[in-house]
Amino acid sequence: MVAFQPNTGQWTTTTEILNDAELHLVANIDPNGWATGTLFMDKGITTTEIESKDYEYYKFHLSSGSLKKWVLNDQNQYAAGRGLDSLTIVNAETHKNTDFACWVSNDETVSNVNITYDATNKSLKLWDVTGPIDMTKLRDLYYGNSEIDQNLCVGILGHEKQFYKLKAGQEVDLTGNAPISFLLENNVPTAHPDLNMTVTVTEANMVNINWRYAQQPGTVKVPYQIPSSIIDIDLTPGHISLDEFISIQTLTGDTDKGEFILTVLNPTDKQPIWSLRSNMQLNQHLNMWEAIAHTRKENFQGVMGLADQTTTDLFLGNGTYTLWNRGAPEPAQTGKYPSENTYGSHPFIMAAAEDGQWFGAYSNVANAQDWIIHNEDVSGNVVINFLATGGIGDLTIFAGATPNEVTEIYHNHIVGLPVVTPQWALGWHQSRWGYKDTA
C-alpha cells in the first residue's frame, strides 16, 4: 500500500502540497486480499518537527473489507495534511459487487463513503463525497457486499443505531414454564436478517437465552455451535413460570420504537440481575451482543471471572479482555492491567447483586472473543460488550445465595467445565472485600 499525490505542477512549496494537493492511498492486494503500508507526513518546514514529534505517522492494514489504521506517533496534536481523498484498491475483482462503505471516527461517528468499481482496471475506489477524511480522526474504513458481508456500517458499538424487535404479529407469553421461541426482525432489515430467540428456564433455575438465524442465509456459513459432547448445558425445563425469572420491555421512543430488552430476574425478590439489549449481530465472522450486569452499588466492585488468573484483585476493571486461547503474560506478571490475553480461560463471570445474592453468566461460545467491560460504580451497572469471531448467541444466567452456590450450579449443570473460582480465592475475596458467606 502506497500514498499517491497527483502532480499537476501548480504547487511550489511543501505547504501548498499539504494543504491543496489530493492525497490517495493505493492498495495492491495479494491473493488473500491483504495489503499493508505506512504513511509519514510532516509540515516540511523545520527539523524540529521531528524532535518535537509534530508529524503524522500511521500504519495501515487492509483485509476482509476493512482498512484499519494504527497511530505510530501518538504525540502529534494537529493534522499535517488536508486528509485522505480516496482509497483505491487494485486487483479488486473480488470486490466488484461492493454495495456499502463508510468510515468510522475515533468517537464512533459514521460517515458514508462513495463507491466506484472500474471493471476495465479491476479497481475499487472509495471516498467521502463531503471532502477529505481527517486522518487524525479516522479509525476504520469498512466496505463490502451486503449479501455476503456483515454490514459494520450499521449498528456496532455506537454506530448507526440498529436493534431487533418482535416480528410483526408476535406475542410472548411468559405465564407458562415451557421454553418459548419468538421471531425477531431488525429495524434495518437489509443489513441484518431475522433471528429466532429461544428462552428456557431450567430445572436448576438457570435462564438460557439462545438466538440464531431464523432462516440461514445461503451465502454465509452456519455459525459454529459447541457440540454437546464437549459442553452439555442441562436444559431440562423447570416447573416455575417464566415470568418469575424474566421480563421483556419494549421501548417506545422515536429512535428506538419497538426495541426490546430482555431482563433476567432473581426469582427470590424479582430484582434484575442481567439485561440483554437487542442490538445483537450474527455473521460468519462476527457474533456480538451487549448486556448489563446489575451488581450492587454498595462497596461496588463489579464482576469477576473470565480466566484462571485475570488479576490479583479478581474483579475486572474497565478495558478489553481478550480470550484467544493462547499463552501470554498476565497482569500479575507484567504489572499491566487489564490482561492483553488470557490462557486457560472461561467465558464466565459472576458478581454480587443489589439484593446481596450472587449471580453468574456463561457464554457458550468457543470462538476467539473480546469482552469489553465498562463499570458504572454509581449505578452499580457493568456494561458488557461481547464480540467473537463467530458462533451462535447462547447465554446462560443463574443466581445463588453465595459465590460457592453459583459456581456449584455452573459446575453441575454446564457439564464439561471445571469450577473456575477456587475456594482459596473466594476466602481471600471475603477477607479483603467483606462479602459474606463466600468461604
Image (cartoon, rainbow, N blue to C red):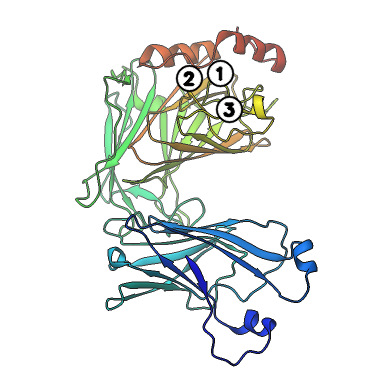
Closer to the N terminus: mark 3 or mark 2? 3
Q: Which residue is disc 3 drawn over?
A: 303
| Residue 428 falls left or right of residue 397 | right
The percent position of residue 136, horizontal first and vertical second, equals: 62, 64
Marks 1 & 3, CB-CB < 8 Å contact: no
Specify the quadrant that holds the C terminus.
top right
Q: Which residue is disc 2 drawn over?
A: 399
Identity, as a three-letter code, of the amino acid under mark 2: Ala
Along the line of sight, which residue is nearer the eye, 242 or 160? 160
What distance separates the C-alpha of mark 1 from that of mark 3? 13 Å
Closer to the N terminus: mark 1 or mark 2? 1
| Residue 105 falls left or right of residue 335 | left
Identity, as a three-letter code, of the amino acid under mark 1: Gln
| Residue 423 falls left or right of residue 418 | right
Along the line of sight, which residue is nearer the eye, 45 or 420? 45
Secondary-structure class at tag 2: strand
Secondary-structure class at tag 1: loop
Marks 1 & 2, CB-CB < 8 Å contact: yes
Taking the view exactly as shown, the residue that stands out farthest to the front is: 47
Q: Which residue sits at x=59%, y=70%?
A: 134
| Label 2 CA crowd tier, 10 Å (few <14, some 14–19, many 20+) | many
Res. 5 mark: none
The percent position of residue 321, horizontal first and vertical second, equals: 54, 35
What distance separates the C-alpha of mark 1 from that of mark 2? 7 Å
The percent position of residue 363, horizontal first and vertical second, equals: 41, 30
Q: Which residue is disc 1 drawn over?
A: 357
